[in-house]
Amino acid sequence: MGAVSVEQVGLTFSGRGGNRVVALKDLSLDVPDKQFAVIVGPSGCGKSSLLDLIAGLKETTSGVCRVNGHEVREPDAERGMVFQGYSLFPWLTVLRNVEFGLSLKAVPRAERTERARGYLSAVGLSGFESAYPNQLSGGMKQRVAIARSLANDPEVLLMDEPFGALDSQTRAVMQQLLLGIWERDHKTVLFVTHDIDEAIFLGDVVYVMSARPGRFIDRIDVGLARPRDYEIVTSEPFIALKRRIQAQLHGEVHKALAAGASDH
């Protein structure tokens, strides 16, 4: 089980000059087990902060985040996190990077190596076990980061713009690879992106956030058949969803720019 519940969550912090900044206000959502949920919104609306709250990396100012009914108080192995910046250990090989979380859980060496190799195969990196991160492309590094999170067998996978730094061709390949893994393992996924096409292509449901203070202004059931291939992005249902989200975000982006917001 990997159900995520966010109930009336608020987040404030001290900004420049000690000014009080309201990042999130009265924000709620429910992500059922095995759902692929995506959040889109303008820069500075609190998308990344929301993931940090669910991961236990930050504390809410008000409200509560729960996973499987248990209140989130600190980071936990049941919640895997994938960041845009890869966060690999440069001194460890690819295999040892993927094994790292398993070693912290005292999984026996043979078992963790077998599991790590299995997930490296799933992300198309068999044969790169002995390579180091500086020998890999950006897309390959992100595949290692995904394999590392999945190897820990989390109930929920939190992904903060994991493909944002990749070129468009590599990004498309990574999206299809992620969907293939999700269709096999059916983890609960909460995925943050600025890219509307990416949100629709990946998600079962798309949440649209307002400018700061972040709140949800729409919840959209995508309703496109699975499995999906990239030809779907030119279909009429896809384009109609894209128009709807673009229209909602247009005014919110202008609000964010006017406020001089920066992502937190």
Image (cartoon, rainbow, N blue to C red):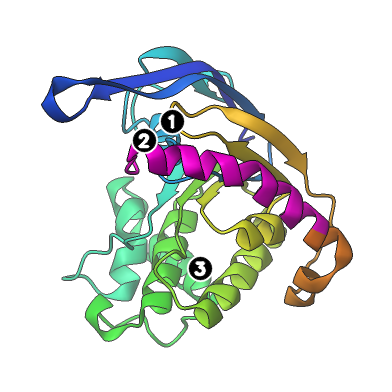
Q: Main secondary structure of the magenta part?
A: helix
Q: Say which label, 3 or 1, has the lower sequence index.
A: 3
**Residue at left offset 51%, top offset 79%:** 170
- In the picture, measured across the screen, residue 262 lies left or right of residue 15, that is right
Residue type (three-letter) at the residue carrying disc 3:
Tyr
Q: Position of residue 260 (x, y in %)?
A: 32, 40
User: Which residue is at the front of the view, 6 or 244?
Assistant: 244
- Asked whether residue 77 appears in the rendered view, the answer is no
Q: Position of residue 111 (x, y in %)?
A: 43, 61
- Asked whether residue 184 appears in the rendered view, the answer is yes
* Residue hosting label 1: 212
Q: Say which label, 3 or 2, has the lower sequence index.
A: 3
**Residue at left offset 41%, top offset 35%:** 55
The residue lying furthest to the top in this view is 62
**Residue at left offset 46%, top offset 78%:** 167
The residue lying furthest to the left in this view is 17
Figure quadrant of the N terminus? top right
Q: Quadrant of residue 207?
A: top right
* Residue hosting label 3: 119
Q: Quadrant of residue 155?
A: top right
In the structure shown, which secondary structural element does the residue marked by tag 2 occupy? Answer: helix
In the structure shown, which secondary structural element does the residue marked by tag 3 occupy? Answer: helix
Q: Position of residue 120 (x, y in %)?
A: 47, 73
Distance CA(mark 3)–CA(mark 1)? 38 Å
User: Which residue is at the front of the view, 81 or 207?
Assistant: 207
* Residue hosting label 2: 259
Q: Say which label, 1 or 2, has the lower sequence index.
A: 1
Distance CA(mark 1)–CA(mark 2)? 9 Å
Contact, mark 1 vs mark 2 (Cβ under 8 Å): yes
